[in-house]
Image (cartoon, rainbow, N blue to C red):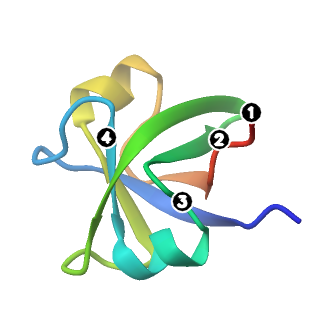
Amino acid sequence: MVKERRLRILHDETAKEGELIVHTDLKDELDMKTKAEIVVAKRRFTFRVKALKTVEEDKIYGNPEELLTMGIQDNSIATIRAPIE
């Protein structure tokens, strides 16, 4: 069974390109090792994961310039899960 959550993805200047910032508990809950997969508007993207306890548990954060080039607006709904191999 695939574990996934639908969350808001926000633009954050502190996030590096190719990286998502998530809460530590979310990373553990979804069994993500080093990478995460997000789906926005039926398009799938893979990112490295950086887990922090200081961010909100119900939000994920990414680099604004990179997300905009992918067509992902600030405060969009995204489904996040560990990558499917």
Q: Kindly identify the residue that appears in the image at 64 percent across and 64 percent down.
A: 6
Residue 47, quarter of the rendered image: top left
| In-image side of 15 versus 29 (left or right) | left
Residue furthest top in the image: 69
Q: Amino acid at mark 4?
A: Glu
Q: Kindly identify the residue that appears in the image at 19 percent across and 49 percent down.
A: 12
| Disc on res. 39 | 2
Q: Secondary structure at mark 1?
A: loop
Q: Secondary structure at mark 3?
A: loop
Please rate how many residues cluster around mark 3, counting C-alpha atoms within 10 Å: few if below 14, some from 14 to 19, many from 20. Answer: some
Q: Secondary structure at mark 2?
A: strand
Mark 4–mark 1 Cα distance, whole angstroms, equals: 20 Å
Q: Amino acid at mark 3?
A: Met
Please rate how many residues cluster around mark 2, counting C-alpha atoms within 10 Å: few if below 14, some from 14 to 19, many from 20. Answer: some
| In-image side of 12 versus 48 (left or right) | left
Is 69 situated above or below 43? above
- Tag 4 near tag 3, CB within 8 Å: no
Q: Amino acid at mark 2?
A: Val
- Tag 1 near tag 2, CB within 8 Å: yes
First in sequence, mark 2 or 3: give its number: 3
| Disc on res. 32 | 3
First in sequence, mark 4 or 3: give its number: 4
Q: Which residue is mark 1?
A: 42
Q: Which residue is mark 4?
A: 19
| Along the line of sight, the residue nearer the viewer: 36 or 43 | 36
First in sequence, mark 4 or 1: give its number: 4
